[in-house]
């Protein structure tokens, strides 16, 4: 049994002014196995953060879950009472490093107080205990607790803030950590260090990690499997190597092709044609067809089903036999 | 080379920021430290470095927005800060800026057409502003222009906004554009398209480009596609390396350049290492 299993998840943002609902996630299904690092790749508006927040039950209106299940070890997290979820799962089993960790800290609180505050929110009030545990996780993220405990957020560099955010997510020793764009605002050198840290957490603590990013070029540096999202739908799921060497879905193919390497020839790097989908417009059929060079008539009317090709999940009509 | 052959020349430019520490102490941050750079017509220069390296400060000095602490910033051989009247007008018209963040640099209360027509009227009072605005939109690939003229920035995607920002920078018919990390806010699949827009602009008219980025791979594609230009690697306010991008990537002289190259995420290198079992 997978550790986390998302089944047919649908999330909408209701916009009362416009009298419409924007569908952010449309029937998303995926499995996360214990002990692995899985990367969710998608561009802005593809639903990555919505998915993370839905799993954490942190979606707020106007977002509404319109159906689907999130099973954690077989228990549907969405059916639990909020009290039970907060007590038994949130941060205890599943925690999160939110997007833009640069700005998640309270500017008036020292680093130490952020740890105490988090613990208190989960009913743990023994300060000495919490600080001992906080020291452990900070040391693990290569920060010196004695030094950073008394610093305010503005005294930390971007990379240090990211490390503190990661340490906070590890405070209650969770089995699964969802990291939302943990390297987004960092330069390449700091990014490399954070990627190494993510791998180390996985290898040494055995923590399962969902690594959300918009940048496919960093995926092979951390994740063994990758899930490709586009416009709120899963396009492709597979082992990182397979997906990058031989992408099956035209979107994945185009995404890999649009990513320059230090040795690419200018001709082989090509942008994905067209514009990203407008979230206010509901695209009939496959969401990628307006930009897809292989689009057929069927793509414009019918959503592709899930095809299984050698352990790979692909949702594309090209694979209909 | 005579210095008036450069459009813009930075000569031994230092920019130091002094911060007070405590009552009597002060701390000096060297944002640029003895930088020399010459930009000619039709030049393409990619400025690469990590955050805090001084990239944006360099852009601001070129634009005349940041006065050097010492050294000179020259426009056609003359100190930018000695320019008066017509000469200053010519400098302003000739050197324009595409800011980093198209979400905050466009006026949310103005339509795309209005954002473009204001600078057109400022610089070319004689031309029909509306026709020229549509021309600029076509130039940056926003077609049909009539579709975009009456739209507000919030109705556009990040990539479209970025194109509007480029179109606006072209309103004065500049000879040099300083683009400060213009792609960080847009999706990776559109970045190459954005580079192509610049390449096309440079093919059509005489235009120089200073492209500030932390992405070495993207800088390389820009330089190779434009078929000219060079890369400048900045570290702690100093130019540590300057020259042909392929030469620098395959044979970096500076330790820091090596670090940048090794840290750059690279799918092809990853595949190669995997095949070789590294």
Image: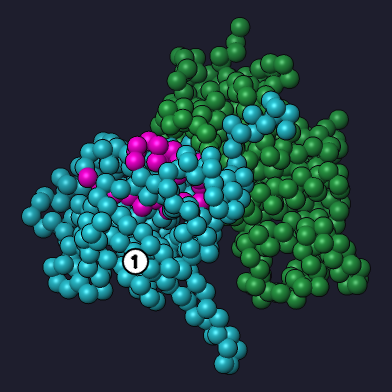
- Disc 1 crowd rating (10 Å Cα; few below 14, some 14-19, many 20+) is some
- Residue lying at 73% horizontally and 29% vertically, measured from the top left: B277
- Residue lying at 72% horizontally and 59% vertically, measured from the top left: A163
- Residue lying at 32% horizontally and 57% vertically, measured from the top left: B38
Report which quarter residue A73 is drawn in: top right
Q: How far across and down, in percent of the image, does residue B206 sit? A: 22, 45
How many numbered circles does the render carry? 1
Among the chains, which one is cyan? B
Q: How far across and down, in percent of the image, does residue B175 sit? A: 23, 52
Residue at image mark 1: B11
Q: Which chain carries label 1?
A: B
Q: Which of A300 and A255 is in front in this view?
A: A255
Q: Is mark 1 on a helix, strand or loop?
A: strand
**Magenta highlight range:** B206-228
Q: Which residue, as the protein is rendered here, is positioned at the far front?
A: B1
- For the question of whether residue B43 can be seen, the reply is yes
Q: How far across and down, in percent of the image, does residue A134 sit? A: 84, 64
Q: Which residue, as the protein is rendered here, is positioned at the far bottom?
A: B23
Split into 4 quadrants, where in the image is the N terminus of chain B?
Answer: bottom left
- Decide: is A282 above or below A136: above
Q: Which residue, as the protein is rendered here, is positioned at the far top?
A: A321
Split into 4 quadrants, where in the image is the C terminus of chain B?
Answer: top right
- Residue lying at 26% horizontally and 38% vertically, measured from the top left: B203
Instruction: Tell whether position B271 is magenta.
Output: no
Report which quarter residue B136 is drawn in: top left
Q: Nearer the viewer, residue B155 or A65?
A: B155
Q: How far across and down, in percent of the image, does residue B230 sit? A: 39, 46
Instruction: Tell whether position B224 is magenta.
Output: yes
- Decide: is A111 above or below B248: below
Among the chains, which one is green? A
Asked whether, in this view, residue A122 is left or right of residue A40, the answer is: right
């Amino acid at each position: 049994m997978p550790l986390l299993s998302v089944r047919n998840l649908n999330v909408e943002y209701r916009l009362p002014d416009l009298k419409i609902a924007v569908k952010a996630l449309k029937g998303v299904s995926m499995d996360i196995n214990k002990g692995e690092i899985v990367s969710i790749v998608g561009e802005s508006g593809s639903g990555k953060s919505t998915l993370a927040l839905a799993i954490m039950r942190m979606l707020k209106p106007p977002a509404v879950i319109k159906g689907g299940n999130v099973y954690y070890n077989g228990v549907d997290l969405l059916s639990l009472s909020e009290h039970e979820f907060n007590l038994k799962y949130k941060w205890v089993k599943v925690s999160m490093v939110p997007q833009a960790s640069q700005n998640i800290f309270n500017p008036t609180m020292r680093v130490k107080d952020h740890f105490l505050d988090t613990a208190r929110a989960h009913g743990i009030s023994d300060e000495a205990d919490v600080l001992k545990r906080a020291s452990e996780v900070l040391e693990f993220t290569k920060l010196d607790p004695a030094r950073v405990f008394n610093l305010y957020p503005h005294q930390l560099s971007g990379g240090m803030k990211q490390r503190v955010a990661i340490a906070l997510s590890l405070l209650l020793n969770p089995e699964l950590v969802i990291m939302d764009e943990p390297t987004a605002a960092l330069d390449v050198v700091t990014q490399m260090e954070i990627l190494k840290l993510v791998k180390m957490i996985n290898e040494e603590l055995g923590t399962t990690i969902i690594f959300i990013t918009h940048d496919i070029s960093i995926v092979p540096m951390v994740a063994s499997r990758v899930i490709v999202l586009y416009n709120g739908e899963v396009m492709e799921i597979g082992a990182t190597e397979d997906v990058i060497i031989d992408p099956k879905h035209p979107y994945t193919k185009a995404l890999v092709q649009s990513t320059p390497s230090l040795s690419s020839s200018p001709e082989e790097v090509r942008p994905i044609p067209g514009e990203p989908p407008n979230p206010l417009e509901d695209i009939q059929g496959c969401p990628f067809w307006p930009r897809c060079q292989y689009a057929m008539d069927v793509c414009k009317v019918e959503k592709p089903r899930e095809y299984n090709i050698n352990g790979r999940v692909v949702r594309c009509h090209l694979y209909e036999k | 080379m005579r210095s008036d052959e450069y459009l813009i020349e930075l000569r031994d430019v230092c920019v130091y920021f002094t911060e007070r520490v405590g009552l009597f102490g002060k701390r000096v941050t060297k944002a640029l430290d003895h930088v020399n750079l010459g930009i000619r017509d039709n030049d393409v220069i990619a400025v690469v470095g990590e955050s805090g390296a001084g990239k944006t400060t360099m852009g601001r000095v070129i634009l005349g927005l940041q006065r050097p602490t010492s050294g000179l910033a020259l426009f056609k051989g003359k100190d930018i800060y000695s320019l008066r009247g017509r000469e200053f007008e010519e400098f302003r018209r000739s050197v324009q800026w595409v800011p980093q963040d198209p979400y905050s640099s466009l006026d949310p209360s103005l339509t795309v057409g209005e954002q473009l027509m204001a600078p057109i009227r400022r610089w070319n009072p004689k031309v029909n502003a509306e026709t020229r605005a549509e021309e600029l939109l076509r130039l940056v690939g926003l077609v049909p222009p009539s579709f975009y003229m009456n739209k507000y920035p919030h109705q556009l995607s990040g990539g479209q906004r970025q194109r509007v920002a480029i179109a606006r920078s072209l309103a004065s018919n500049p000879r040099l554009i300083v683009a400060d990390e213009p792609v960080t806010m847009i999706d990776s699949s559109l970045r190459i398209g954005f580079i192509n827009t610049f390449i096309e602009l440079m093919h059509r008219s005489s235009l120089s480009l200073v492209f500030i980025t932390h992405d070495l791979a993207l800088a390389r594609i820009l330089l190779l596609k434009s078929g000219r230009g060079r890369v400048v690697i900045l570290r702690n306010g100093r130019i540590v390396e300057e020259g042909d991008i392929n030469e620098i990537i395959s044979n970096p002289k500076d330790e820091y350049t090596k670090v940048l190259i090794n840290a750059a995420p690279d799918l092809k290198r990853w595949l190669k290492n995997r095949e070789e079992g590294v």
